[in-house]
Amino acid sequence: MSTQATVGATEVRTETIETAKEMARIFRKKDIPLYMHSAPGIGKSDVMRQLAAEDKSGFIDIRVGTMLPEDLTGIPVPDLERRVAVWLRATFWPEEKRDGKTGIIAFDELSDASRQLQSCIYRVILDRQIGDYHLPKGWWPVAAGNRREDRAAAQSVSTALANRFAHIHIRADAECWCNWANLNDIDPMLIGFMKFRPNLIHSMEGADLLAFPSPRSWARASKVFDASPDMRFKLVAANVGEGAAAEVETYFKAVELPDFDDIVRDPMRTMIPDEPASRYALSAMLAKYANRDNFAQIYKYIMRDDFGADFGTVVVLDAAKREASLCETPTFIQWAKKNKTLRI
């Protein structure tokens, strides 16, 4: 889904990480160089890696902001016999025999690069060549960078370089992050929290710009959600800041969950919490731990009127996304027949 946002003094169209990835697939197929812009921690670098992994193609990550111009152009050395200078190039440039016929070469942190470094990349993007080196035909150049307004050491990209790319501006989106988290072993309590407080998916407001909530820092914080309550706040705050960590602690105190084993053993009589915060956490937990053996019992539980149809739908869809084999069960087929109008 696209929306408008102000970047600097300009209104630009922004995309979620999911729609940006869909657009990137098309640009790659059409061999159009792409530049992805966003605030820090949104997931730009992951998109590039995921695209390469999906196609089982090569991937080379070049952190431009850490380089010198000669790292890109190569170093001239004399060929005394021919009385000319030849260029020794870096080993990171893709070679078809070593790296494969197709792949993605990612110029990450491009907005951190000096103008001199940016100038070195001009011909790579437009002509797929630097010096006497030619990028293999099946290799696609893509770039990513942070925005200057996010105080991330970013500089302006020259118009000469910018005009060589298609551009996508990406915003943080809680729903997209929850979809990713459901597939990537993120604590279900955090998934429930993010569905309950989606506005906290990303924020750079406040004085502390070292630890702030972002899709990347929430994924790290998830690893300490199982810590003891007296330590959890400090551990979470070290990743996402004290304000967001305080919201997490409030959420933990408000949540009341039934035992998962009780739900599977007696789905018709196990209690269903009333508070929305608890329902979000419970839905995430059920989707996380549903499998072919217990799905029928979970289905009985979520089909009770007290559970809520919307929450029940979330459980079924998230569970099926995580474990595709659930779609083959009689329980899922029964649910799908009742919900033919839903996009699965």
Image (cartoon, helix red, strand yellow):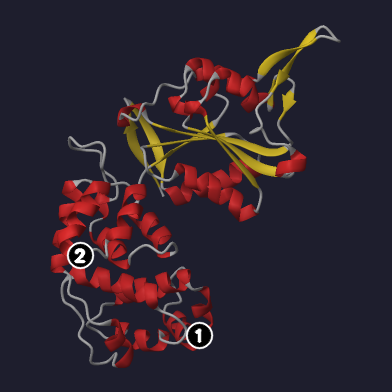
Q: How much space separates mark 2 and mark 1, taking CA atoms?
A: 38 Å
Secondary structure beneath dot 1 equals loop
Q: Quadrant of residue 318?
A: bottom left
Q: Nearer the viewer, mark 2 or mark 1?
A: 2
User: In terms of depth relative to the viewer, which is nearer, 186 or 310?
Assistant: 186
Q: Which residue is mark 2?
A: 228
Residue at left offset 31%, top offset 29%? 151
Of labels 2 and 1, earlier in sequence is 2
User: In terms of depth relative to the viewer, which is nearer, 183 or 237?
Assistant: 237
Query: Is residue 181 among the parts visible in the rendering?
Result: yes
Q: Quadrant of residue 276?
A: bottom left
Residue at left offset 50%, top offset 19%? 159
Secondary structure beneath dot 2 equals loop
Q: Which residue is mark 1?
A: 329
Residue at left offset 39%, top offset 44%? 42
Give the class, few, some or many, for how many residues have Cα within 10 Å of label 1's Cα (few <14, many ≥20).
Answer: few
Q: Is residue 80 above or below residue 320?
A: above
Query: Is residue 310 among the parts visible in the rendering?
Result: no
Q: Is residue 232 above or below residue 8?
A: below
Q: Which mark is residue 212?
A: none
Q: Position of residue 220 (x, y in %)?
A: 34, 53
- Spot the residue most to the top: 83
